[in-house]
Image: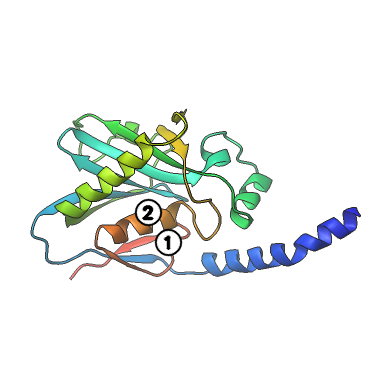
């Protein structure tokens, strides 16, 4: 029975591995911001090495957002098997958020990203789009059915997200969705958090 149970999952495992190899094999994601903006508003794409987050400045300071697998980001379960499971099977996801007051060292002091970062990309988008995204994410976070859970590692308050986390919907791909919502074109694979800014 145990052997049969394992064999049932072999096709799913093979498909998951194939998908992962495909995603890993992509080149860097090329980000193309809009060239003509009526009211430019800065946003910051933060590359943390393996994952990315988005920071939106506003009149009261700035807010950082990130999407991640709940067990990895919030519960701290980061072993090899936990990581493989998160990639191959849909698992619970979380939306992380934290506000910061006006900062003295633009664009982002180290305390904004306690897990570290490799690079910060300053991008511009139409102000109305930036504000719409910020309001939508803030409303989702505030309307969560459960209270936020704070992660010391990432410096973010996480609430459950409506879509699962897996290889086809992970943190970097979620950031791509946000950038596209801001009117930017993104081509190539962002799976490994490799980014290249293409401007006219």
At a point 26% along the width and 43% down the height, the residue shown is 135
Disc nearest the viewer among 2 and 1: 2
Query: As rendered, which of 121 and 191 lies closer to the eye?
Result: 191
**Spot occupied by residue 15 in the image (x, y as percentages of width and height):** 66, 67
Q: How many marks?
A: 2
Quarter holding the C terminus is bottom left
Residue 19: which quarter of the image?
Answer: bottom right
Q: The residue tagged with tag 2: helix, strand or loop? A: helix
Indicate the secondary structure of the residue bearing disc 1: loop
**Image point (45%, 50%), residue name:** 51
The percent coordinates of residue 123 (x first, y second) are 22, 55
x and y percent of residue 83 in the render? 61, 48
Residue 103 appears left or right of 150 = left
Q: Residue furthest left?
A: 38
Q: CA distance from mark 2 to mark 1?
A: 9 Å
Q: Is residue 19 above or below residue 64?
A: below
Residue at position x 89%, y 53% in the image: 2
Q: Nearer the viewer, residue 98 or 197?
A: 98
Which quadrant of the structure image shows residue 79? Answer: top right
Q: Specify whether 12 is left or right of 96.
A: right
Q: How is the image coloured?
A: rainbow
Residue 34 percent location from the top left of the image: 19, 65
Q: Residue furthest right?
A: 1
Horizontal side, residue 11 vs residue 101: left or right = right
Quadrant for the N terminus in the image = bottom right
Q: Report which residue position mark 1 lands on.
A: 190
- Look at the numbered discs 2 and 1 and tell me whether their residues touch, using CB distance below 8 Å: yes
| Residue under label 2 | 175
Frontmost residue, 86 versus 21? 86
Tell me which label, 2 or 1, sits earlier in the chain: 2
Q: In the image, what residue occupies the spot 33% across and 44% down?
A: 137
Badge 1 local density, few (<14 within 10 Å), some, or many (20+)? many
């Amino acid at each position: 029975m145990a052997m049969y149970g394992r064999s049932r999952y072999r096709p799913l495992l093979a498909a998951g591995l194939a998908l992962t190899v495909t995603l890993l094999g992509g080149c860097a994601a090329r980000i193309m911001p809009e060239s003509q903006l009526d009211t430019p508003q800065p946003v910051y794409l933060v590359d943390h090495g393996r994952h990315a987050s988005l920071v939106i400045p506003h009149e009261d300071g700035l807010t950082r957002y990130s999407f991640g697998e709940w067990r990895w980001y919030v519960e701290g379960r980061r072993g090899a098997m936990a990581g493989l499971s998160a990639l191959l099977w849909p698992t619970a996801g979380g939306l992380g958020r934290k506000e910061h007051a006006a900062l003295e060292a633009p664009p982002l002091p180290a305390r904004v990203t306690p897990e570290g970062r490799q690079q910060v990309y300053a991008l511009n988008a139409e102000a109305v789009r930036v504000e719409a995204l910020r309001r939508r994410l803030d409303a989702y976070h505030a309307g969560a059915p459960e209270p936020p859970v704070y992660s010391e590692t990432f410096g973010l308050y996480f609430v459950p997200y409506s879509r699962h986390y897996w290889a086809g919907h992970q943190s970097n791909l979620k950031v791509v969705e946000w950038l596209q919502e801001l009117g930017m074109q993104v081509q190539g694979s962002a799976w490994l958090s490799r980014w290249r800014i293409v401007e006219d």
